[in-house]
Amino acid sequence: MGHSNEIDILVSEVGPRDGLQSVAATMPTELKLKWIAALASAGLREIEVGSFVSPKLLPQMADTAAVVAFARTLPNLFVTALVPNLKGAEAAFKAGVQKITMPISVSEPHSLANIRKTHAEVYQEVRNVVALRNEQYPHVEIEAGLSTVFGCTIQGEVPDDDTVRMALIMAGLGVNEVGLADTVGYANPTQVRRLFTRLRQELPGIAGSAHFHNTRGQGLANVLAALDVGVTTIDASQGGIGGCPYAPGASGNIVTEDLVYLLESMGLRTGIDIDRLVHAREWLRQGLPGEALYGFIPDAGVGKNFHYAQKAL
């Protein structure tokens, strides 16, 4: 996926997109750029820097093209963005992203509520985006980020078969990878193990990232389950920003700082420096004054027995 290979697990930082678009305040562009530069210098190799959506809907994301242009100048950084439709994809490709993620609800009621599109309309949109990519931007990767995979606030249960069927349809439409997201924090480790096992069996080479929320406190337990069955890309958000709107007071995304500590202490290399990562929170504090930041490692530190994962001999 265009990453150098001296890491075991790719931590994909989604705070600048998933985090910032969930917060009412808009972070000034200049501070956003400093934050992203600080994350990159801490060793993050992949950052979802924004989303290409209507600025009327999400003014927080109005500067995404400029943010992408800046992020592309940072060494060793793979720059991704979220794109809901063809119009967004056109803007993202023009701006110079290296990968787009299209959010695809496995639950049709969620799709209708979220992007006002039926599944049939979603498939057509993906078809159009893939065609544009193939014609004009062949080097850009497309990920289908399947959401509501582990349950849905509207539909409730989401059968595994529905998720696998959706993943196969996406692969058939020409996406490069399919990730699974626990949009509302319903997932448990048994379910995670089961679904990623099936995804990797039925779509070898296309099964992608795991995106978990910590809404009900299961985030890192779900990460362990995903690691157990061979997932190598995990999404996280600095400070856990991006709260779940349906669970007041709960942090949404899993915390990048805590995830990196977990992985490194288990002997899995991330290429990320924890001190520098914690230091990058400073830009978040300045850019979003008063916003709650989560995480244990920034408060407790790493402990005297901690050492970074070593390269296997």
Image (cartoon, rainbow, N blue to C red):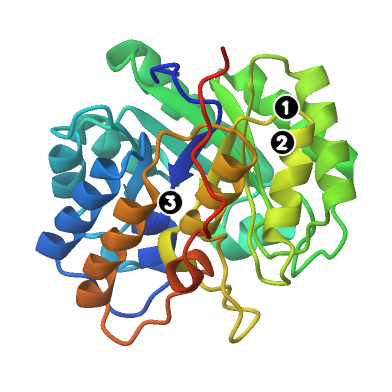
- Determine the CA span between mark 1 and mark 2: 5 Å
On residue 227, which mark appears? 2
In which quarter of the view is residue 76 placed? top left
Residue at numbered disc 1: 230
Which x, y percent locates residue 238?
Answer: 41, 60
102 sits to left or right of 138: right
99 sits to left or right of 282: right
Residue at position x 84%, y 53% in the image: 158
Residue lying at the far front of the rendered structure: 304
Asked if disc 1 and disc 2 are in contact, CB closer than 8 Å, the reply is yes
Q: Tag 3: residue type?
A: Val
Residue at position x 63%, y 61% in the image: 213
On residue 14, which mark appears? 3
Q: Is residue 200 above or below residue 270?
A: above
- Do we see residue 179 in this rendering? yes
- Determine the CA span between mark 3 and mark 1: 21 Å
256 sits to left or right of 79: right
Asked if disc 3 and disc 2 are in contact, CB closer than 8 Å, the reply is no
Residue at position x 79%, y 30% in the image: 229
Which is nearer the eye, 25 or 170? 25
Q: Secondary structure at mark 1?
A: loop
Which x, y percent locates residue 55?
Answer: 26, 63
Q: Tag 1: residue type?
A: Gly
In this view, the mark in front (3 or 1)? 1
Say whether disc 3 or disc 2 marks the residue closer to the N-terminus: 3
- Determine the CA span between mark 3 and mark 2: 19 Å
Mark 2 nearby-residue class (10 Å; few <14, some 14–19, many ≥20): some
Which x, y percent locates residue 149?
Answer: 75, 49
Mark 1 nearby-residue class (10 Å; few <14, some 14–19, many ≥20): few
Q: Is residue 274 above or below residue 186?
A: above
Residue at position x 56%, y 17% in the image: 174
